[in-house]
Image: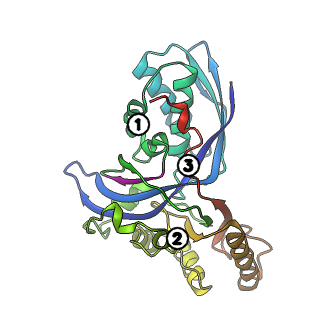
Amino acid sequence: MLYDLIAPAKLNLFLHVVGRRADGYHLLQTVFQFISLADLLDIDVREDGQICRETDMQGVPHDQDLVVRAARLLQQSTGAKQGAQLHVRKRIPSGAGLGGGSSDAATVLIALNRLWRTGLSRAELMRLGLQLGADVPVFIFGQNAFAEGVGEQLTPVELPPQAFVVIQPAQAVPTQGIFQAPDLTRDTETVKIMDFSGPHAITRLGFGRNDLQPVVLNLFPVVRQTLDWLEQAGYQARMTGSGSCFFIGFQSVQQAEMAKQKMLAKIRVDFSDVASVGVDSSVCPIQTLTVCESLAEHPLRYWIES
């Protein structure tokens, strides 16, 4: 059995929609940054071939859960006879644009490839992961990356160490509806990796934008209220993925922690009826504030031999 397997969250430092394929899939350019906020998974091998999820996930039926689907896909693709008992301790909020479900699925593929001794290469696991979702391959890739295509064409990038405050609004955002929105920008000019090289552009959110952000703000009032509050408080924040979370970059954990404390103090003033963050979303739009660090690579990167 493997305990406390780390499934880290990701941030999209920018996210441009540069086109749309004939099959309806959107063409993207983005930079993925792994962060220390993470889910934890326990995985045990079963000899009866069954895939069982111990964790009860609200609103997610057992057979539709990405961790179950990932295990079954690996099983079917390799002919593995063993099964798995899966337990997920969620720390990454759902519908937040942080890639929690995709990261969990990737960790299951990486871990079971080792436990079942199926021997798939990194490239083979990434191809399986893409069948589960566009964000899954980057977690198997194991490095912060510049991504193109639907998110599967990955080039490693070195990013400066930094810290973030991640702000979760009290409203989740389903990805599918955002990409189907008629007002989504789909013709942003393509960029090259060297266009955003250098620590200053990324740390200060000076490069690019998130093309999905205006769509989310139009459709989800609590998310818009959160960003409005952040801007009024003097913070430059950007949404990650398809929402709902925003992030602000800092050079150190100490700076990020100081900013978080200032935000909490202002929340207590601006929403005086709220005892603490997340108590009453009808009054305060912010659910959680989390300080986390950037990761240079995925914690399980070297679990795959090639």
Determine the residue positioned at 74% across, 68% down: 279
Q: Looking at the picture, which amino acid does disc 1 mark?
A: Met
- Residue that mark 3 sits on: 100
| Residue 215 falls inside the magenta stretch | no
N-term-proximal mark, 3 vs 1 = 3
Q: Quadrant of the N terminus?
A: top right
Left or right: where 44 falls relative to 144: right
Q: Is mark 1 on a helix, strand or loop?
A: helix
Magenta region: 144-148
Identify the residue under disc 1.
126
Q: Name the residue under label 2.
A: 203
Q: In this view, does 305 lie to the left or right of 287?
A: left
Q: What element carries label 2?
A: helix
Task: Give the mark, 2 or 3, whose residue is nearer the N terminus.
Answer: 3
Mark 2 residue type: Thr
Closer-to-camera residue (22/190): 190
Residue located 58% across and 75% down the image? 226
